[in-house]
């Protein structure tokens, strides 16, 4: 019988991409995927360290994994437990101290070593392997070819961040910026399209600072890469996430006018509407500069809609500063957004800043902000009723005959459709809406 693997992914889209690549590595080693942890010979937790809660979740899941491991042991079944991702980078020693039964821990830049590590553990050559180094070689050169696992695929083009926003662990967990060469990206993109992908989302922690080399060793920017991507036959939709406002060049903005397959939706985190807080956050943009960028983007493509991330209760944030965030939200009008209470991350400058905001105040501000953001999202969804959108169907729904797909604006759409529509784009008329999804009817 084939050995089975189970992967639980926490956090961002980059982690989803990494998990997909690790799954392929395991499949090449002869393992088969299972969604049932009890059946798994290898259990992997691909972790996130961005906010406190995300890291805590890991340790409760590890506790449960130990119980399952013990139950399996009674049935004479071995279980290997591995931890990957940003928690490993941030606190590798801590993981083994708190969960000594973990067999291995690999950081986000070393997971290509998974087969070698498994081999060593299975041969009982080594135990409790930890590798959270920042290797000189790129893991991308060691990973097997990527393949689509549906109509939408992520493709990592850039990793790490040099911005050092004062609240953020990413520069410490994912290291300094690295951009993959243009040729590698295009090769992976073509392979994804050949294996069934219609939509590619180019990923990077700071994707719009992309500066990969072309085949002549010349540095190229994200705009260049987008034009190259748009030449790929069969690719119907293109996105890029996540962008940093100060790196939104006019050349990149022009792509939203010139590239048909670039979706009219951009996630551009502003974090705060107060210039004082943006400065304390070490963001290299002001409120005014952000507004100007959005105006230019909407001029380039009048159909473009925005989404963002916000942090409330950053150290030093007063009621007036928070008010500035609310007025910015009104000015921009987001169709979707993610908002968080500021959470102290060990080792980051903001964790030791003066004037930390009380938890109660953070919660009040988050409630106010989210209420307004949800209202905007609901209103946008309502405005879609009666309209027809191209929907890329990605998964089956909970009800019989129901499929779930996404509009160009990333809204979830539920519709009755034949199973062979999975992975395909269809025209769908929107019949009703809620804050989080749309209900529609396939018309073509
Ligand atoms: N506290 C709260 N939110 C944070 N984010 C990043 N670091 C923190 C932190 N320490 C949020 C930012 C970022 C998103 C991915 O997570 O809004 O854009
Ligand atoms: Fe973190 Fe700022 Fe880099 Fe985003 S831009 S990953 S928030 S340091």
Image (cartoon, rainbow, N blue to C red):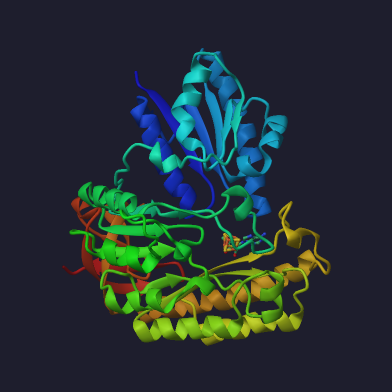
Residue 403 to residue 126: above or below = below
> In x, y percent, where is residue 205?
51, 58
Q: What is the quadrant of residue 367 in the picture?
A: bottom right
Within the displayed image, which quadrant is ligand 2 positioned in?
bottom right
The residue under the point 30% across, 52% down is 183
Picture quarter with the N terminus = top left
Q: What is the quadrant of residue 297 in the picture?
A: bottom left
Picture quarter with the C terminus = bottom left
Tell which of 32 and 121 is nearer to you. 121
Residue 288 to residue 53: above or below = below
The total of numbered circles placed on residues is: 0
Tell which of 391 and 98 is nearer to you. 98
Q: Residue furthest right?
A: 354
The residue under the point 68% across, 64% down is 341
> In x, y percent, where is residue 241?
44, 63
Relative to 314, 237 lies left or right: left
The residue under the point 31% across, 45% down is 149
Q: Is residue 399 visible?
A: no
The residue under the point 21% across, 64% down is 426
> In x, y percent, where is residue 220?
38, 63
Q: Is residue 351 visible?
A: yes
Residue 204 to residue 267: above or below = above
Residue 118 to residue 36: above or below = above
> In x, y percent, where is residue 46?
53, 41
Tell which of 53 and 36 is nearer to you. 53
């Amino acid at each position: 019988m084939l050995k089975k693997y189970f992967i639980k992914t926490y956090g961002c889209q980059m982690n989803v991409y990494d998990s997909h690549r690790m799954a392929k590595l395991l499949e090449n080693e002869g393992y088969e995927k299972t969604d049932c942890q009890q059946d798994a010979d290898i259990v992997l937790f691909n972790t996130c360290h961005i906010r406190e809660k995300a890291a805590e979740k890991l340790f409760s899941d590890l506790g449960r994994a130990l119980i399952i491991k013990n139950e399996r042991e009674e049935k004479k079944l071995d279980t290997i437990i591995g931890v990957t991702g940003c928690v490993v980078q941030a606190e590798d020693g801590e993981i083994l101290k708190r969960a000594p039964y973990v067999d291995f821990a690999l950081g986000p830049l070393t997971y290509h070593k998974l087969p070698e590590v498994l081999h060593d553990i299975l041969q009982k050559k080594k135990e409790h392997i930890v590798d959270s180094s920042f290797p000189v070689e790129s893991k991308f050169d060691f990973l097997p070819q990527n393949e689509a696992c549906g109509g939408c695929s992520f493709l990592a083009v850039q990793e790490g961040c040099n911005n050092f926003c004062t609240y953020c662990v990413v520069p410490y967990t994912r290291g300094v910026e690295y951009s993959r060469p243009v040729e590698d990206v295009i090769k992976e993109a073509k392979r994804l399209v050949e294996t069934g992908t219609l939509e590619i989302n180019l990923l990077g922690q700071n994707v719009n600072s992309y500066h990969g080399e072309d085949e002549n060793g010349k540095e190229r920017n994200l705009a260049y890469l987008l034009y190259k991507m748009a030449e790929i036959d069969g690719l119907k939709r293109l996105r890029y996430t996540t962008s940093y406002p100060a790196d939104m060049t006019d050349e990149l903005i022009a792509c939203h006018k010139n590239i048909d397959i670039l979706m009219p939706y951009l996630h551009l985190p502003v974090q705060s509407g107060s210039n004082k807080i943006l400065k304390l956050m070490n963001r290299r943009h002001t409120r005014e500069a952000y507004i100007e960028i959005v105006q230019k983007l909407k001029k380039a493509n009048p159909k473009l809609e925005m989404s963002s991330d916000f942090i409330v209760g950053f150290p030093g944030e007063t009621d007036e500063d928070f008010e500035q965030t609310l007025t910015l939200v009104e000015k921009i009008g987001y169709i979707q957004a993610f908002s968080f209470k500021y959470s102290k991350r060990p080792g980051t400058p903001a964790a030791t800043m003066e004037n930390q905001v009380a938890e109660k105040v953070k919660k009040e501000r988050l409630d106010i902000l989210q209420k307004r953001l949800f209202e905007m999202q609901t209103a946008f969804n309502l405005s879609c009723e009666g309209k027809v959108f191209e929907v890329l169907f990605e998964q089956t729904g909970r009800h019989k005959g129901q499929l779930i797909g996404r509009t160009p604006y990333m809204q979830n759409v539920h519709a009755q459709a034949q199973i062979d529509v999975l992975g395909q784009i269809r025209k769908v008329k929107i019949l009703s809406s809620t804050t989080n999804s749309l209900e529609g009817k396939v018309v073509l």
